[in-house]
Amino acid sequence: MSTISREEVARLAGLARIDLTEAELTRLAGELDVIVDSVAKVSEVATADVPATSHPMPLTNVFRDDVPQEPLPVDAVLAGAPAAEDGRFLVPQILEED
Amino acid sequence: MAGTTGSDLTRRSAADLAQALRAGEVSSVEVTQAHLDRIAAVDGAVHAFLHVSAEDALATARDVDARRAAGEDLAPLAGVPVAVKDVVVTKGMPTTAGSRILSGWVPPYDATLVERLRAAGLPILGKTNMDEFAMGSSTEHSAYGNTHNPWDLDRIPGGSGGGSAAAVAAFEAPLAIGTDTGGSIRQPGAVTGTVGVKPTYGGVSRYGLIALASSLDQAGPVTRTVLDSALLHEVIGGHDPRDSTSLPDPLPDLVGAARQGLTGDLTGVRVGVVRELNGEGYQAGVRDRFEESLELLRAAGAEVVEVSCPHFEYALAAYYLILPSEASSNLAKFDGMRFGLRVEPTDGPATAERVMGATRGAGFGDEVKRRIILGTYALSAGYYDAYYGSAQKVRTLIQRDFAAAFAQADVLVSPTAPTTAFRLGEKLDDPLAMYLNDVATIPANLAGVPGLSVPNGLVDGLPVGFQVLAPARADDRLYRVGAALETLLEQRWGGPLLAQAPQLPTVTEGSTR
């Protein structure tokens, strides 16, 4: 069935925002090929007449009363952040300079 | 206090401890300290815990003792300590989900199930080891070292909840919390000789569980007896408005069902043996123990029939498309911005996007990377229909198989895991071989039905488990049948299976007092 190349793994890693080493790319390409070959058997029985199920217990119109509740204290939330300043998350530059 | 030394206390069931606490024979401080001492003595060898919260546990214990002395009406398990899997967030207590990316993170809030444990007065002993983000069947994918099976320290304790199962099996805790996405409560139960229950999907709130696959995840009890699981399930279960997938229905009478089962009478209960969850791929000894257990059920009055679930052979494949797909989305939140690790790239501009890539590259382990990439692939343009779409259709077919089977039987049964505990390292380099450990447990997660594993014997000195599955919302049936089998087996063994476990090496007890 499919073959997942090293380049394809690199592209997927880019989409998933995970920096992989050269060694990881090579190893994952081999492993994913085997795994994808194995899981592709789902298409044998997934015919057009079978509806898809996304959720085991279909619940609809799940509402709760619209009651304001105490939010978490800002300090407690920011205590776990890698960096914070002035009561906010401090994050790296968001846009590239070009 | 003759007869209630620390080591005696750690070997008693939660139900017994609760009774002794109510009768005033022992205090919660004594019970909690006995377990903390046991952890100090054996956890160097077992490594079930990532964090031990002695002060927090003893503070709860003192509070419960004071309230009991004041005549307050307390919850049934008040004062009985519990260990919590590290994927469940605990306010003021480190929570890592076994991942380096959350090293040192202290959550600002409690999961709903933790709130319920605290409200019921259960001292929390600490957080238990697990495969990183619950991805694995051996706990070897933890970023914080292996947990060792108390039956043989060179073997795996199962996974992903190997820490919770090992803690209970090693008498470090009478109760523990697990989570089960494809078998992570039941399979560790099987290989450590303990009881584990995955409730009906939505039966226990997922609020405050670090999500792996949201349509599959379910928290549940990990204990040494079926009755103890029922007692703990009743503490943590029930509707939670903070989880939109939480079932609004009240829980069935789980403790009552377990007590009924303990009479050993199963007259009129129809037990369906799933043809596809036995035979090829299952170790011969596992099949032998399973057949012996079926004989006991028949002798107890159950009607044992064979049922067929022809699409179960596609369950593993569907699971390894659905789970990675959901995980790749759920784990996107680990971006190095709001909590946990942040790593800057070694060269070039430190933009948010590049920091995210560097953080995830450094913070995630091999299995997490493997599954996120697999999920990204399954969800990507051009492959979505063939992989994720097909897997969702298989999910429908598996639900139909269950519906047909439950028309013929009240519960379905199988071996919980195909083999006994394997050696540490044995399957680490073969992802597919590792995935096969959950072949019998995964169908329940795909369909949302509840499942229980109860120890049903030894093969070459290692425990095996018997799985019971029930229709959605009929968790009480698990407890009735599980407790009946447990009591019949214990009559045969002359006591609990764990009484046959080898002594663990200990460092001097009481040295941490």
Image (tube, coloured by chain):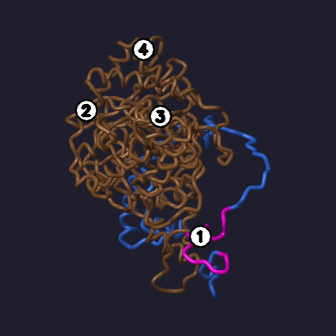
Residues at badges 2 and 4 in contact (C-beta under 8 Å)? no
- Expressed as whole percent of the image width and height from the top left, the position of residue B311 reads 48, 32
Report in which chain the residue with disc 1 lies: B
- Expressed as whole percent of the image width and height from the top left, the position of residue A49 reads 62, 35
Residue at the extreme bottom: A98
For mark 1, give the secondary structure: loop
Q: Kindly report the distance in space between the C-alpha atoms of the residues bearing marks 1 and 2.
A: 47 Å
Which of disc 4 and disc 3 is earlier in sequence? 3
**In the rendered image, what is the letter of the chain coloured blue?**
A
Report in which chain the residue with disc 3 lies: B
Q: Give amino acid for label 1.
A: Arg
**Image position of B206 with respect to B448: above or below:** below
Q: Image quadrant for the C terminus of chain B?
A: bottom left
Q: Kindly report the distance in space between the C-alpha atoms of the residues bearing marks 2 and 3.
A: 35 Å
Mark 3 and mark 4 on one chain: yes
Mark 3 and mark 1 on one chain: yes
Q: Give amino acid for label 3.
A: Arg
Per the image, the residue denoted by label 1 is B338
Per the image, the residue denoted by label 3 is B22
For mark 3, give the secondary structure: helix
Q: Kindly report the distance in space between the C-alpha atoms of the residues bearing marks 3 and 1.
A: 45 Å
Per the image, the residue denoted by label 2 is B458
Residues at badges 3 and 1 in contact (C-beta under 8 Å)? no
**Image position of B79 with respect to B364: above or below:** above
